[in-house]
Amino acid sequence: MEYNAAEVAREISNRWGNLPENIIEMMHDVQTKLNYLPKDVLYEVSHVASVPISKIYNIATFYNAFSLKPKGKYRICVCLGTPCHALGAPRVINALERELGIKCGETTKDMKYSLEITGCVGTCGLAPVIVINEDLFGPIPVSGVSKLLKKYEK
Amino acid sequence: MKNYRLQLMVCAGTGCVSNHSFEIKDALENAIGKHNLQNEAQVVLTGCNGFCGAGPILVVQPDNIFYQLLKPTDVPLIVEEHLVKGRPVKKFMYTPPAEKNPIPKMSEIPFFADQTLIALRNRGMIDPENIDDYIARGGYKALAKVLSSMTPDEVLQEIKNSGLRGRGGGGFPTGVKWETCKHAHGDERYVICNADEGDPGAFMDRSIIEGDPHSVIEGMIIGAYAIENVRQGYIYVRMEYPLAIKRFQIAIEHAREFGLLGNNIFDKGFNFDIEVRRGAGAFVCGESTALMASIEGKPGEPRAKYIHTVEKGLWDKPTCLNNVETWVNVPQIILRGAKWFSSIGTGDVSVDAWGGSKGTKVFSLAGKVNNTGLVEVPMGITLRDIIYKIGGGIKDNKKFKAVQTGGPSGGFIPESMLDLPVDYEELTKVGSMMGSGGMVVTDEENCMVDMAKYFLKFTQEESCGKCIPCREGTKRMLDILENITIGKGTEDDLVLLEELSNMIVESSLCALGGSAPNPVLTTLKYFREEYEVHVKDKKCPAHICSQLNTYSIDEKLCLEIGHGCDVCKKYCPDGAIIGERKKVHYIEPAKCSKCGACYDVCNFNAVKVQ
Amino acid sequence: MTKLKIEDLDKIAEDVRRKMTIREGGGKVKITVHMGTCGIAAGARTVMSAFLNEIDIHNIKDVIITTSGCAGLCSKEPMATVEYGEQAPVKYIELNETKVKKIFDDHVLKGKFVQEYALAIGSERIQ
């Protein structure tokens, strides 16, 4: 994705009043906009919001929501809440790893899919649950994995 | 305004939305247009109904007919038969397990009939994005009452008298918390709503926010008034709940437009506003000091609480933090009185604020029960009633094993204790806790060692790393549990697990570490024999720990039903499967790494586990 | 939107009360229009619209209108049943717009049933 680091940083920082205490919200916006936190954007944000870059990296590595590496076009997040676990989510992860040929936490070479684990998304009635970008699917049994992925093949 | 005769309530909670409830809405509007009913029937999107396992849900009012598991293609029939001809369509109604006849009326379905609604009183009744709906159900009346006829001290006293205790898990008396914050030194204070519902398997707060965001806001405004010198409140919502964040933002905007937030609310000279802050995927941020650090834009690490947050919290100012469900109870207590509230529940709180559990508790019932969803029950109800009466019993007639309450901080409760009343003290006594309200049911096909390992893995990963007992202790415990599940455990390990657990409970900095060993301790206490089978016989009775399993292929099923489909061979990462298409397949035990892939991919149940 | 005063809460609530009455399944009066095939053929839709129209004109909040299937008396269609508070339900037959108006004025608004259009008082019992 093409972006202008200085512009992205200025726009987002302004939205949050350039206040250092809103740094986490700013990083959320960068993550949503670009799907990861590129180094050059973080430096620009550090500059406009007056937050030391070391602190930004501290936050970026502390919270699960942030990624310093680019993610695939489709972020496949498998819910690992208790009901999902009890209803077989670990086996769903195995199945996804087999289908995509990557391990959990990795991205396919063509930058199409990333496979991740997410905290409970709170739709436990649908366990086991998979979230792909904004869309939530469930219940997805092991046998439903390849069918689900076919939707994204195009 | 049009005078409709029908209100079609379509559930738009996250669960139903992901099951395409928006398509149901479109299909309804389409069919209504076709039959020229647009002046008679209105489609309303509501918050979560709680019966998530039955989604997408449509409730037709005033007939109170409950339709479930709908597809857009089912809609034309419902419109034609029910809306036009007045004949509710049986085949889309709910039929209880093991019964033949469907139950048409929502209010007669056991799942709904046995609940008592205070916190969820507006669920399915209002459009959460429409403030008028909330006001029509008595919304902001409590605020009006407080501002026009009660002093802050009177409000505080009312909350104290009600016996309301923190619904986030700890059960701290809300009135006492407010009072301490009110009398703490400082000229400026904050109130915070903790909507960082981190416990896996808990979705009460999500559901309340998605269905009735204004009730949280109203509760917070009343709290701010009672505590005094509070100008600003924050709602901290976890980022995994995008819909909840959106609904809060809309609700706050509407409240501001109506002057219910901002300066001089109701012209009574009271000023207060609220902002939403998004969490960033850290479980520990549900802990009060970590949450406040996060709002301040720092990594969410807890601090030692020699000085409580009610004295020095956000920006070092006195801060009162309550959970979503706690705030939601406040307007109802003001409107209906402390006496009414304290008449529900157990014990007596008139002398000792810790003397009983009052009001209701919302639980998210999930796992191996027939009716998964959100239930609100009076305190004191038994676990058995929740699981069997409301939850409709165990899925597929399997045998109940344990119910887990309180998430990673709670414990497993066995069958023998199902008649335990739901009460803060009672649940703590047996080694679990009320927690925020997650209630996960497990059956005979779940391995208790695996479940304990699951929770420990969760807390271990979510440990912020600040204090050693939690960071290193949970890691060691996890190592031991991993060993047990791959057949390398010894009997000494069980003793060591207990020792480590007690040490971590005693010496951790915050409640995350302080309660992390609970799932292990309770499973060791109530299901010790399962651990023993793992360490002595190197077997997993539930066949969940795959390293302790032996996989083999049933020749008959493989050849006669599967016709030697060859799929298992394709997926076997070890090359341990011998055979070719249309012939019987075998597993070579020496090569097999016991990953279980063949078992998962076989469509003919030909792979057997022992 | 202007800032709310306390008394505005009641005004807003009153405006949407009819919707809430329907959702809560409450209401003082319940009107059931019988919408079987013969009912519709005989003009049940007109009857329905006439009732809705009356609700509009009088701006009544606590009346709910529902439909039901064939009442089993096809020759007397269109029919409707009116239930006023705790009183016994009254079945009206061979309805038209004028009759609806009178029923609305007398029975729905004032609680006095209209003898000359009524078939029976009370519902048949189901064993």
Image: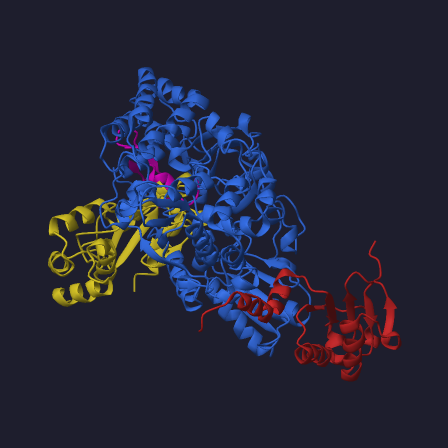
Quarter occupied by residue C46: bottom right
Quarter occupied by residue B300: top left
Give the prevailing secondary structure in the magenta stretch. Answer: loop
- Please provide percent x and percent y for residue B230: 37, 52
Q: Is residue B379 left or right of residue B216?
A: right
- Please provide percent x and percent y for residue B170: 42, 36
Q: Which chain is yellow?
A: A
Q: Which chain is blue?
A: B
Asked if residue B482 shows in the view, the reply is yes
By what rule are the colours in the image chosen?
by chain
Total marks in image: 0
Does residue A44 sit above or below A101 in this rendering? below
Chain C colour in the picture: red
Q: Residue at x 84, y 58 (%)?
A: C125
Does residue C116 sit above or below B9 in this rendering? below
Asked if residue B569 shows in the view, the reply is no
* The one of B55 and B209 positioned closer to us in this rendering: B209
Q: Is residue B17 left or right of residue A22?
A: right
Q: Residue at x 57, y 44 (%)?
A: B338
Q: Residue furthest top?
A: B492
Quarter occupied by residue B304: top left
Magenta-colored stretch includes residue B586: yes
Q: Residue at x 44, y 23 (%)?
A: B527
Q: Residue furthest bottom?
A: C98
The quadrant of the picture occupied by the N terminus of chain B is bottom right
What segment is highlighted magenta in the picture? B576-605
Q: Is residue B134 left or right of residue B186?
A: right
